[in-house]
Amino acid sequence: QVQLVESGGGLVQAGGSLRLSCAASGSIFRILPVGWYRQAPGKQRDLVANITSGGITNYRDSVKGRFTISRDNAKNTVYLQMNSLKPEDTAVYYCNVDLTTSRSLWGPGTQVTVSS
């Protein structure tokens, strides 16, 4: 079974940077696509970025050029490097893995707060 734990969130001023980590347990993690999602208070959960097992990446338009998703399968970890942070990036960030079309795993989330 795969377990996901996010870390790296915190409070940062606008223009600053954070690197989020999604650490996984389970040997199948390395072959699975992984997504970073975020949810702000009162808002729906939205995809931020995802990465395939082969390293193909996708980003929502609002973070392109600022965020970078990467993975180190040897460490069972997926990263989200966030630069030039804006207050609108404030949200709880979640790591997600789709094991099957009907079975998804989520981490508990890590809070990112960007102050003005």
Image (cartoon, grey):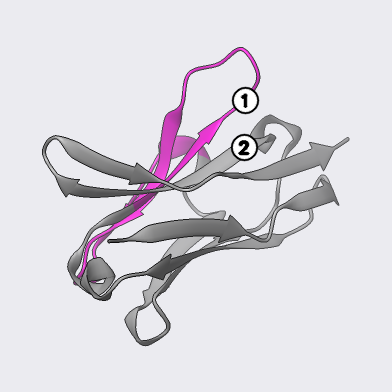
Q: Quadrant of the N terminus?
A: bottom left
User: Could you tell me which residue is drawn at 42 percent across and 83 percent down?
Assistant: 75
Q: Can you name the residue that lies furthest to the left here?
A: 101
User: x, y (%) of residue 56?
Assistant: 23, 64
Task: Using the image, tell me which numbered label, if any, was put on residue 40.
Answer: 1
- Residue nearer the viewer, 29 or 19: 29
Task: Provide residue 38's location: percent of width, then percent of height.
Answer: 52, 36
Residue for point 36% across, 87% down: 74
Q: Residue furthest top?
A: 42
Q: Can residue 29 be found in the magenta stretch? A: no
Residue 27 to residue 14: above or below: below
Counting residues from the start of the chain, the first of labels 1 and 2 encountered is 1
The kind of residue tagged 1 is: Ala
Q: Residues within 10 Å of mark 2 (few under 14, many from 20)?
A: some
Q: Which residues are magenta?
A: 35-62
Quadrant of the image occupied by residue 115: top right
Q: Position of residue 36 (x, y in %)?
A: 44, 48
Callout 1: SS? loop
Quick one: quadrant of the C terminus? Answer: top right
Q: Secondary structure at mark 2?
A: strand
Q: Write the residue at 62% across / 25% down.
A: 40
Say whether residue 13 is left or right of residue 76. right
Residue 62 shown left or right of residue 35 in the figure: right
Q: Mark 2 — residue?
A: 92
Is there CB contact under 8 Å for labels 1 and 2?
A: yes
What residue do we see at 82% from left, 45% from top?
14
Seen from the viewer's position, the closer of residues 97 and 62 is 97
Pointer 1 local density, CA inside 10 Å: few below 14, some 14–19, many at least 20 = some
